[in-house]
Image (cartoon, helix red, strand yellow):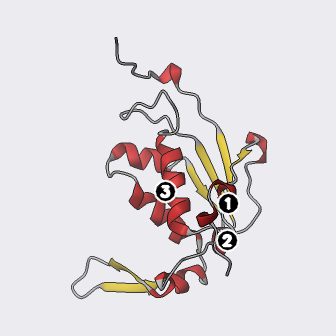
C-alpha cells in the first residue's frame, strides 16, 4: 500500500461563502481554519496549499460568548514601554471589525510560510456585500452544522 501525496495538478480549489451573522467566533474560526488548510478533503497533504478560498461576510455581527467582548487584545509597538491594548468590543465597534475574525483564524493555523500563504485565501468583509460574485462561491451554512454554532444577541 502506497501513501498518496498530492501534487499541484491534483489540487482542486473551490470558493466558499460564509455568513458570520450570529455565529460564535471560535467555532467559526476553527471551521474556516480547517477549510483553509484543506483538512476536509480526503486527499489532504500537510505540506501543500490544498485549502479552499473562503469569503466571510457580516464579520461585524459575530458573537462572542462569556466575557470575551471585554477581553483585551495586546500588541507591542517595538519601542520601550510600547504595549498597547484594545478590547474585542472596541475593535468590533471600530473601523476594522473584521480584524477580530482574521486574527482568530490566523492563530488557529500552525505558524510558518505555508500558513501565511493559506491566509491569503481568506477574505473577510464587515458588511454583506463582497466583490467575488464572479467566482460563484458555494454557500456554507455554519449555523446549520451545530446548534452551538449560533448565539442570539
Among the 4 quarters of the image, the one containing residue 107: bottom left
**What's the mark number on residue 143?**
1
Q: Which residue is drawn at 51% across and 49% down?
A: 120
Q: Residue at x 55, y 77 (%)?
A: 64
Between circles 1 and 2, the one closer to the viewer is 1
**What's the mark number on residue 30?**
3
Query: Secondary structure beneath disc 1?
Result: helix
Q: Residue furthest front?
A: 147
- In the image, residue 56 lies at what x, y percent? 64, 58
Q: Which of marks 2 and 3 is nearer the N terminus?
A: 2
Labels 1 and 2 touching (C-beta < 8 A): yes
Q: Name the residue under label 2.
A: 22
Labels 3 and 1 touching (C-beta < 8 A): no
Real-space CA distance between mark 1 and mark 2, rounded to the nearest whole angstrom = 8 Å
Counting other residues with Cα less than 10 Å from the Cα at mark 3, is it few (<14), some (14-19), or many (20 or more)?
Answer: some
Q: Residue at x 38, y 42 (%)?
A: 114
- In the image, residue 51 lies at what x, y percent? 52, 39
Query: Secondary structure beneath disc 2?
Result: loop
Look at the picture and state if 136 lies above or below 150: above
Look at the picture and state if 132 lies above or below 96: above
Query: Secondary structure beneath disc 3?
Result: helix
Task: Judge by depth and name the residue closer to the eye, 142 or 84.
Answer: 142
Q: Is residue 52 left or right of residue 138?
A: left
- In the image, residue 28 lies at what x, y percent? 56, 60
Amino acid at each position: 500500500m502506497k501513501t498518496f501525496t498530492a501534487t499541484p495538478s491534483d489540487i482542486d480549489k473551490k470558493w466558499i461563502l460564509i455568513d458570520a451573522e450570529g455565529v460564535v467566533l471560535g467555532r467559526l474560526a476553527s471551521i474556516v481554519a480547517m477549510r483553509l488548510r484543506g483538512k476536509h478533503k480526503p486527499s489532504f497533504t500537510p505540506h501543500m496549499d490544498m485549502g479552499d478560498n473562503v469569503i466571510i461576510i457580516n464579520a461585524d455581527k459575530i458573537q462572542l460568548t462569556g466575557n470575551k467582548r471585554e477581553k483585551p487584545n495586546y500588541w507591542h509597538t517595538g519601542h520601550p514601554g510600547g504595549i498597547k491594548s484594545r478590547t474585542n468590543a472596541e475593535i468590533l465597534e471600530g473601523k476594522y471589525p473584521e480584524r477580530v475574525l482574521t486574527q482568530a483564524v490566523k492563530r488557529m493555523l500552525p505558524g510558518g510560510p505555508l500558513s501565511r500563504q493559506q491566509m491569503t485565501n481568506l477574505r473577510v468583509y464587515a458588511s454583506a456585500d463582497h466583490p467575488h460574485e464572479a467566482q460563484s462561491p458555494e454557500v456554507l451554512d455554519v449555523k446549520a452544522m451545530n446548534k452551538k454554532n449560533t448565539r442570539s444577541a
